[in-house]
Image (cartoon, grey):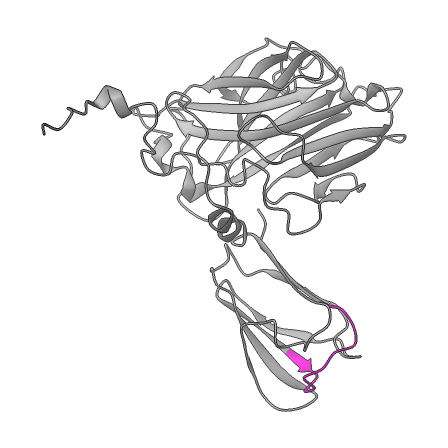
Amino acid sequence: MALSKITNASVADTAVHGRRNIILNGSQIIAQRATSSTAVGGYRTVDRWYFNVNGSYDQLAVTQSQDSDAPAGFAKSLKFLVTTAETTLDAAENSNFGQAIEAQNLQQLAYGTSSAKSFSLSFWVKSNVTGNYSVTAYKQTGSNRQADKQYTINTANTWEYKTLTFAGDTTQSIANDNGVGMYLYWHVSTGSDLGSGSTNYDWTSYSSAGWAAGQEVNLFSTANNYLNITGVQLEVGDASPFEHRSFSEELAACKRYYRNFIDSDASPVGFLPAKYSGNNGHWLTVVLNPEMRAAPTVTVSTWQNQTPSLYKSNPKDITLTNVNGSYYSNVNTTFVADAEL
């Protein structure tokens, strides 16, 4: 029996084409820290996503959470819910959420050369507040440069798919190292000192007028306003269907930046991949697999009525001293290693 002919066109829309999505945890499925937080600012819930609040914001209260509301084909989203409104937005106040991307993961963009490539940023978004919002791409290699794009939420309480195209930057390169190569900021609130310029900027030197250009919505103006986002993808060239990675793949990628070890009812060493020696006051070496981005900051809770001290930390392993020798623990033990950008 003759085989059917397979053409390039027949597989173009469904083939994986390698690892396309540069964003980590774009489907919001990994949340090592917590699934909900009322803390304003910082890394709090879903991995690799942070929340920035700049200015006084003396009234604001926001809950951010890993939410089960998501469009078809997705299980989770990141949600920001205003619980106490900021009734007066000062001129210098601005707030956003986003992701810092490791520089060596961006080399395919060929920035700083005549071959610099454009990239597409696509995502699903839902809010009760319709209107114009802004996304900023920002680089700090050498001089500060930015590109700002406006998008519109057209229908309240409805998942909408957005695609933004950012031109290649032939002027400024991205260092090939483990530092920050680019920040992406989704703006949700911006005072009058910012964003007064054109609604769309390609790569240019930083300016307050360009920052958050096109942002007209103040999500924080009213209690119970919300915004959900998921399915975030950054890829070279044109946008394509979201690249779903397995839970285990996404978790391993996130552990390069943050990881925790939690033991609630067993031995304080049984849950750690470790070499152990002696009784009270001895040491414990924990192998970090996968290797972390940089030497992590280490936080350890009280451990069998002791508080271990950090002896050394590097991307491949950490060593603690003053570790109890007992194999039994009556307290919850939490061990955190943080190498976030």
Name the outermost residue toward the bottom: 278
Residue at the image position 26 percent from the left and 21 percent from the top: 10
Name the outermost residue toward the left: 2
Q: Nearer the viewer, residue 263 or 14?
A: 14
Q: Nearer the viewer, residue 83 or 114?
A: 83
The percent coordinates of residue 259 (x first, y second) are 60, 57
- The dominant secondary structure in magenta is loop
Q: Is residue 131 visible?
A: yes
Q: Is residue 206 visible?
A: no
Residue at the image position 68 percent from the left and 87 percent from the top: 325
Q: Is residue 323 magenta-colored?
A: yes
Rendered image quadrant of residue 19? top left
Q: Is residue 55 magenta-colored?
A: no
The percent coordinates of residue 30 (x first, y second) are 59, 46
Question: What span is in magenta?
Answer: 321-333
Q: Nearer the viewer, residue 299 or 311?
A: 299
Tell me if residue 76 comes above or below residue 316 in the rendering. Answer: above
Tell me if residue 24 comes above or below residue 85 in the rendering. Answer: below
In the image, taking residue 251 as reference, residue 168 lies left or right, namely left
Rendered image quadrant of residue 305? bottom right
